[in-house]
Image (cartoon, rainbow, N blue to C red):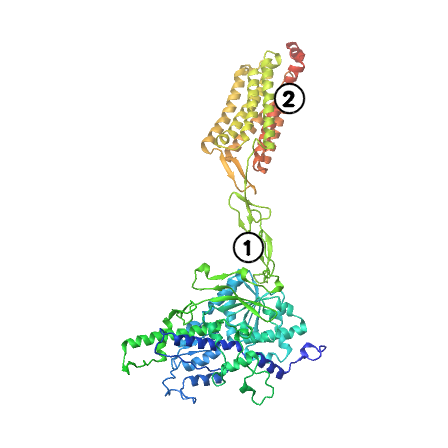
Amino acid sequence: IVGETSIPLHHYELNKDYISALINSFFSSRTKNYQHILSLAFAVKEINENPELLPNVSLGFHIYDSYTNARMTHQNTLKLLSSHKTVVPNFKCNKQKNLMAVIGGLDSEISLYMATLLGIYKIPQVKYLDCLDSRLAVTDVKTHLPSFYRMVPNEEYQYEGIAQLLQHFQWTWVGILTMDDDNGDKFFQTLIPMLLKHGICIALKGKIPATSQAADTLTSFDSILEEAIYLSNASVQVLVVNAETITISFLLFKIYAYAALADILPLAVGKVWIMTAQWDFSADTTQTDMDMQVFDGAFTFAIHLNEVPEFRKFLQTVCPKSKNEDGFTLLFWEKAFNCLYSDSMDGMENNNNACSGEENLESLPGTLFEMSMTGQSYTIYNAVHALGHSLHKMYSARQKHRAVPNRGGVSPVKVQPWQLHSLLRSISFNNSAGDRVSFDENSELVSGFDIVNWVLFPNKSFLRVKVGGMDPQALPDQKFKVNEEAITWHRIFNQVLPLARCNDHCHPGYRRKKKEGEPFCCYDCTPCPDGKISDQNDMDNCFQCPEGQFSDKNKDNCLPKNLNFLSFTEPLGATLAFFILFSSLITAAVLGIFIKNKDTPIVKANNWEITYSLLISLLLCFLCSLLFIGRPNIVTCYLRQTAFGIIFSVAVSCILAKTITVVLAFVATKPGSRMRKWMGKRLASSVLLGCSTIQAIICAVWLCTAPPFPHFDMHSLTEEIILECNEGSVTLFYCVLGYLGFLASVSFIVAFQARKLPDSFNEAKFITFSMLVFCTVWLSFVPSYLSTKGKYTVAVEIFSILSSSAGLLGCIFAPKCFIIIFRPSLNTKDQLIRRNI
């Protein structure tokens, strides 16, 4: 066919005569379609043999072939309208040949040719296959074709079913092929917006030449190479095809023709084909000559059907007896069994290939004939019964009002075709298969579509498996169904669900980010930010975890947050509690030493009442730190900062009183000094009470206006909920700290001025150093407090309390304890006088 392989591909040409012969051999013999005739005859036989349906009327039928030609269609339609072989419209002389309805129109073009004539006489035309022409919308049927009825469901359900099937398997990157005609344009215009609405992108759009153009496109490999891009695109694994059976056969021929040169067959095989109801694989006789494994595992949307119980028995009775009796049967028999009858072999010497008449239809492969009713045959069967039931209702209604005696019987009731319309539109009955047959307001069959999975075997046999369906009458969540376990995928997929995506899934923990300049199905995967997750594939946005939960490491799950507070049971809390108790014991020990040695000069010289007050306040300072450890509650929140502020104010006030007492003691000893009257315990007590009272007033105002309270902080930490004491009024909290700082600063300044006064037991130097430590600790506390969160904020405050308290205790009392315990010789009055001299 193609000549030498060294010649460039664009020089290859196919012999046009060979192509014509090939087309004739592929498409002239449609043995599968003979079942349509048999289903028509079977339905008429059922009605005529049913005593309860049209009891006094017999149905008959005439069959004409349109040859898919407009001229022949018009001519044969006129023959139906005439009672003679000669076409004489509007003249009938044979009362037995009363045309009531026409069943036919294999495609939309032929149907419209017939409708233009039949509509004039208002003869019902029941169409059993294909769709309406794109030039006429379904909603305009009542206006333009009032005599037109369709034994197929609304195509919108098929489009919706295709979108649902693609969405169910998450196929979002698909190609669409359709015929290069008006119906193909309508298919694009209807399906593509629906797919986009369901989040499915169109990877490619292509048109297959219509039947009338297919032969011309096969005369050169240029057209084959041009269309091969649809099949060689490895990124497109799912193809939605809307075409007639003959057109698909041309496409199949192109696949194999191009495969012989470019080796694209594996790429064409590695795809999932989704066909519309126009294509019937079992009716494609090309499979008898070609390997159809390309379409193994394909899906087709087929008109819903059920098994008709008696149809198989009827087929078993079919057998040609004479050529004159049934020319269709003879022709079918010769083609199906590849034999010739005696009349066909006249003049032939070799009669080894003679038909015996005993051949069995059940022995034929399914590629040639099926014993179970096909979808097209089922619609013809329902069409005949719809007309039969309509006629029955009309005759029954007329006979009630008109009964003319005639030889002991009733004269036939004269009915006209136009009288059937009102009955057809309202007809509703159950057929022998148990399905309800009725028309909707658009004269379309009220039904749905089956999803059929085709399993093809190397021996050219096939298996038709119903794996789902689209039922518009079902509940919203049950309209579309598919059984994945019943599906058989092409062997190249190894029974694994094929993928049809522009890129890989964005797994949980990631979100989709659109690629600029690419279809919306093409995207990058971006990790979810902290605190947000995505728990499904291909999520457009990450969502925030519920309050009280946080995102895990993979950002695909929310985990409950743990409570964050400083507990006695954790190492940090236990350590701080140990130091608090240890420091308290040390302070208590120092207090005990001073009480035991209260009569010694070193204790008497330092105003023992103020000293005792300072030691007790330091002891309480250590102990108040325990309020910061443990689960916060209302009581501890009230006492934490207020107790700390008041007790520390007492401690610092004691130090200030001691410092002022030292300064005044030296000033008062000067001759003529007027400060003597200020000397005594009253001054120290006044300073202590006055300074402490101010802090107590501040804390009282704080507790009365905006007291601290337990608070759950959900947002400061990612994985924990901070259980803390909210300060209530931050201003008053800093007023407490500020007042402490003020007292400490005054004490430091006064002590610094008195640090060089001569005295054996002069505390000014020690107070100066202690207040330096105190101020340093609390100055560093503020930034540390603000920069930490949760239990560490509490730990910082406890550490500051312990450090500052320990600084005061160590700097002021450590030297005195050292003298009292280790150098008692210095703790005498003589030593004190000697040092003063």
Q: Is residue 311 visible?
A: yes
Determine whether, in the image, residue 712 is placed left or right of residue 503: left
Badge 1: few (under 14), some or many (20 or more) residues near its Cα, within 10 Å?
many
Residue 539, labelled with which disc? 1
Q: Position of residue 575 (x, y in %)?
A: 61, 29
**Residue 491 picture quarter:** bottom right
Between residue 214 and residue 330, name the one nearer to us: 330
Badge 2: few (under 14), some or many (20 or more) residues near its Cα, within 10 Å?
some
The residue carrying mark 2 is 765
Residue type pointed to by label 1:
Met
* Location of residue 1 with respect to 672 vertically, above or below: below
Q: Which residue, as the protein is rendered here, is positioned at the far right?
A: 6
Q: Helix, strand or loop at disc 1?
A: loop
User: Which quadrant is home to the C terminus?
Assistant: top right
**Residue 54 picture quarter:** bottom left
Determine whether, in the image, residue 485 is placed left or right of residue 79: right
Q: Helix, strand or loop at disc 2?
A: helix
Determine whether, in the image, residue 783 is placed left or right of residue 53: right
* Location of residue 326 with respect to 720 vertically, above or below: below
Q: Which residue, as the protein is rendered here, is positioned at the far top?
A: 830
Q: Position of residue 635 (x, y in %)?
A: 48, 30
Residue 261, labelled with which disc? none
Q: Position of residue 315 (x, y in %)?
A: 48, 75
Q: Position of residue 451 (x, y in %)?
A: 51, 66
* Location of residue 687 with respect to 51 vertically, above or below: above
Kindly check if marks 2 and 1 are in contact, taking CB atoms under 8 A apart as contact.
Answer: no
Q: Is residue 146 visible?
A: no
Residue type pointed to by label 2:
Lys
Between residue 785 and residue 776, name the one nearer to us: 785
